[in-house]
Image: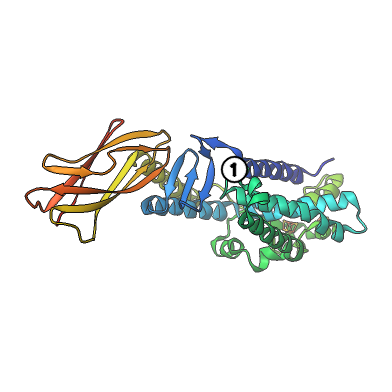
Amino acid sequence: MQPVWRRYRRAAAIAQAILLTGLPFLKINGQSALRFDIGELNLYFFGTIIRIGDFYLILAATLFLLFFIATVTVIFGRVWCGWLCPQTVLLDLTGSLATIIGQKHRNLIGKLVLVPLSALVSITMIWYFVPPAEAIAGLFSSPLIAGFFIVLWALVWMELALLGRGFCTSICPYAMMQNALFDKDTLVIEYDKSRDSTCMKCDDCVRACPVGIDIKEGLSNRCIACAECIDACWLKSSKRDLPPFPNYKGRIMRPKTFLLGGLTAASALVVVLLFAMRPPVEFTLSRVQEPLPAGLNRYAYTIYNNSSKPLELELDAPEGITLIGERTISIAPFGVIRNKVLLRASGKPDEVSLTLHGDGISITKEAGFL
Ligand code: SF4
Ligand code: SF4
């Protein structure tokens, strides 16, 4: 008989590994589904773009993320740690492979298995900043990408091979934050003390625990909720028609679930609305401070294309103002154009305006004139 939770955890780990390594290859609207472009400081996010200057969007998305993490942690405890955290997934995988290859030198084999695995993790992390094809080519042609990859590879290997599960208890900020969020109803894995007299004290649960906890001694903040102890116990207890002694304990349906779930849903709605309300094109205009002959001013403008289609736009000045510079502007999908134009005005106006139009768009911006 196969242990129950391990089977589900393995399925979750495989799905997560496929998702994390596959996501950088997925393209939506011609761009990576999820990638932070360091050069432009843009986040490509499932068919749309978040620029570093979109403070309101970043703030709303951060709030949603905080509510989401708090909700999941308060209700489901360390479900992330035990089921989905790459640290757990990679160390579980390494442990299983090492056991299959050779139980005798398990530790050494585990460290060797981590060498190619760390390389895959490192290049996958780079894919979230540089498109996969560019990153792979860069390994052989760009000293920056190659150097970064080697340093990251070494760091990931050292973290997994030398710190291992110790990372969860000593460094991981999420682990530290979780203890503050738990309440008496949070889902945890606990030993049933009321049935202690029928426990066989075989210590299979202790041997199965990847962090070396004896769950019979009570809850430990080192527990990553991996459920290995439940499975180990169940293999024995089921032969006596008994439920496992360690098991999930908690109350999922309670007022706090609805309160936190509601806040998370509301913050998600705010994010969606802010995205929906964002204009497809943004246009800024400002006068450049520089000495020029009377009646002549230089202006810097920036045009952001927030849409996934290329745009052909025109810049126009009102009557009495002469625009000197490029009038026709082509912007790539999600692109940005920064340029300058000269404006000549007769009659010394206090302000001048420029209109950007085309493709169903018309935006007029004003700026001072000296
Ligand atoms: S006590 Fe059980 S659930 Fe907690 S880490 Fe150990 S094996 Fe996993
Ligand atoms: S595996 Fe189960 S039966 Fe054995 S010691 Fe642990 S709790 Fe008791």
Judge whether residue 226 can be spotted in this image: no
The image quadrant where one finds the N terminus is top right
Q: Quadrant of ligand 2?
A: bottom right
Q: Residue furthest right?
A: 104
Please determine whether, in this image, residue 339 is positioned above or below residue 318.
Answer: below
The residue indicated by pointer 1 is 24
Instruction: Say which quarter of the image contains residue 23.
Output: top right
Q: At which x and y percent is residue 361? A: 28, 34
Residue at 53% of width from left, 53% of height from top? 69
Please determine whether, in this image, residue 4 is positioned above or below residue 56.
Answer: above
Q: At which x and y percent is residue 37? A: 50, 50
Q: At which x and y percent is residue 354? A: 21, 43
Please determine whether, in this image, residue 208 is positioned above or below residue 357.
Answer: below
Q: At which x and y percent is residue 320? A: 11, 42
> Which secondary structure lies at badge 1?
helix
Residue sitting nearer the eye, 364 or 111: 364
